[in-house]
Image (spheres, rainbow, N blue to C red):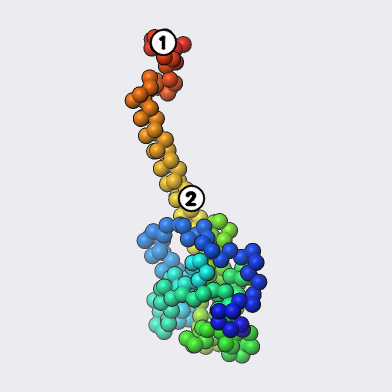
Amino acid sequence: PPPRGVCTMDYEGMRMGPTGAESLVMDAETLSSWQGIVDLMAEICGVPAGLVMRITGNDIEVFVSSRTEGNPYHVGDAETLAGSGLYCEHVIKTRAPLHVPDALSDATWRRNPDIKLGMIAYHGHPIVAPSGDLFGTICVLDTKPRVLELQYDKLIESFKQHIEQDLESMRRAQELESRNRDLTAAMARIQALEGVLPICQYCKKIRLQGADEADPKSW
């Protein structure tokens, strides 16, 4: 693997700055739901760590971490993404799932940073934001060699899809809120105009200056 801080991977076309997902507002209910997802994922897969990782600028951080015994990852832990050698870096670069049964027996992964934490087995999927940018990853890690069975891969994929649906729901809610703000501002401007212009309260047309308001043609 490349030395820390040196990017030998081709990141051309990969957005490393702020993504559309970073502007989404995460409510407490959704965050609690995601916590339940990683807790259940780790429990069912029988691993010490289940994570949702999030890209923030040029870094990747632990966004949600399972409350399982032996989990060394804490919310807020972050690494520079490009050239980190992390399992998740590969998932983000390829936009594809990654399964590493035993990093110690694999020349590609035997020196990756997660091994310092004892995590030698990995399985992760990319999480794609509604904008098409990558939000991050959802993954499980183990301290012993592990070939993940197909049903567990499908489980993780279903959790990934659930999270992506939550991101889309947040986008729609935020978009609706923005439209409502614009509408409220527009109505306030109309009300302000009604104070200085003869505007019909029903059809919102402006009466011609000097015309008789009883004359329908004056509007």
Dot 2 corresponds to which residue? 172
Image coordinates of residue 40 in percent, x first then y, are 44, 72
Tell me the crowding category of disc 1: few under 14, some 14 to 19, or many 20 or more residues within 10 angstroms, Cα based: few
Q: Are the residues at dot 2 and dot 1 in contact (C-beta closer than 8 Å)? A: no
Task: Please tell me which residue is depicted at 43% across the width and 76% down the height of the picture.
Answer: 77
- In front: 39, or 195? 195
Q: Amino acid at mark 2?
A: Arg
Dot 1 corresponds to which residue? 211
| CA distance separating discs 2 and 1 | 46 Å
Q: Along the horizontal axis of the image, is 35 left or right of 20?
A: left
Task: Please tell me which residue is depicted at 65% across the width and 66% down the height of the picture.
Answer: 12
* Quarter of the rendering occupied by the N terminus: bottom right
Is any part of residue 96 visible from this angle?
no
Image coordinates of residue 112 in percent, x first then y, are 56, 84
Tell me: residue 177, above or below residue 210: below
Please tell me whether mark 1 sits on a helix, a strand or a loop: loop
- In front: 186, or 6? 6
Please tell me whether mark 2 sits on a helix, a strand or a loop: helix
Tell me: residue 188, above or below residue 171: above
Residue positioned most to the bottom: 105
Q: Which mark is residue 69?
A: none
Tell me the crowding category of disc 2: few under 14, some 14 to 19, or many 20 or more residues within 10 angstroms, Cα based: some
Image coordinates of residue 62 in percent, x first then y, are 45, 73
Q: Amino acid at mark 1?
A: Ala
